[in-house]
Amino acid sequence: MQCKSGDHIQTGHIQFPKILPNNICRVIAMGDWEKCEDGEETYNALMKKTNEIDAIVFLGDMAYNLNKNNGEKGNEFLAFAQGLISTIPFQVSYHY
């Protein structure tokens, strides 16, 4: 997607391109992601394609037991994912 220069949505210190009407939006839907060998392969593949992805919708099963070891597992996962989720708009869905 090519956005017109200067068309951005700004949230805090992060700017994301604004999706304009009639433009194609390239969205990845994914789930079941944690910090492990497969998760790192997914991360690396997505980071190579950041200029080809407009948004990611995360459908669930994000790093099991985020509260394990007093939240340390969650901190490790978020530090691992930060490069990707701070580069591409990332929406997490919730279902119980």
Image (tube, rainbow, N blue to C red):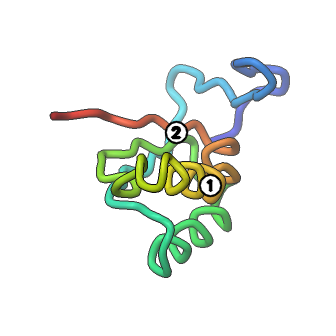
Taking 32 as reference, is 11 left or right? right
Amino acid marked by disc 2? Phe
Vertically, is 12 above or below 95? above
Q: Quadrant of residue 52?
A: bottom right
Vertically, is 6 above or below 42? above
Rate crowding at label 2 as few (under 14), some (14 to 19) or many (20 or more) other CA atoms within 10 Å. some
Pick whichever, 3 or 71, lies toward us: 71
Question: Residue at coordinates 55% horizontally, 73% vertically from top-left?
Answer: 40
Amino acid marked by disc 1? Glu
Q: Position of residue 78 (x, y in %)?
A: 58, 49
Question: Residue at coordinates 81% horizontally, 24% vertically from top-left?
Answer: 13
Q: Secondary structure at mark 2?
A: strand
Question: Residue at coordinates 40% horizontally, 57% vertically from top-left?
Answer: 63
Label 2 sits on residue: 90
Label 1 sits on residue: 52
Q: Secondary structure at mark 1?
A: helix
Rate crowding at label 1 as few (under 14), some (14 to 19) or many (20 or more) other CA atoms within 10 Å. few
Q: Position of residue 88 (x, y in %)?
A: 62, 43
Between the residue at mark 1 and the residue at mark 2, the CA separation in whole angstroms equals 14 Å
**Which numbered dot is residue 91?**
none
Q: Position of residue 27 (x, y in %)?
A: 45, 45
Taking 74 as reference, is 88 left or right? right
Q: How many labels sit on residues?
A: 2
Question: Residue at coordinates 44% horizontally, 63% vertically from top-left?
Answer: 34
Pick whichever, 67 or 83, lies toward us: 67
Vertically, is 37 above or below 88? below
Q: Quadrant of the N terminus?
A: top right
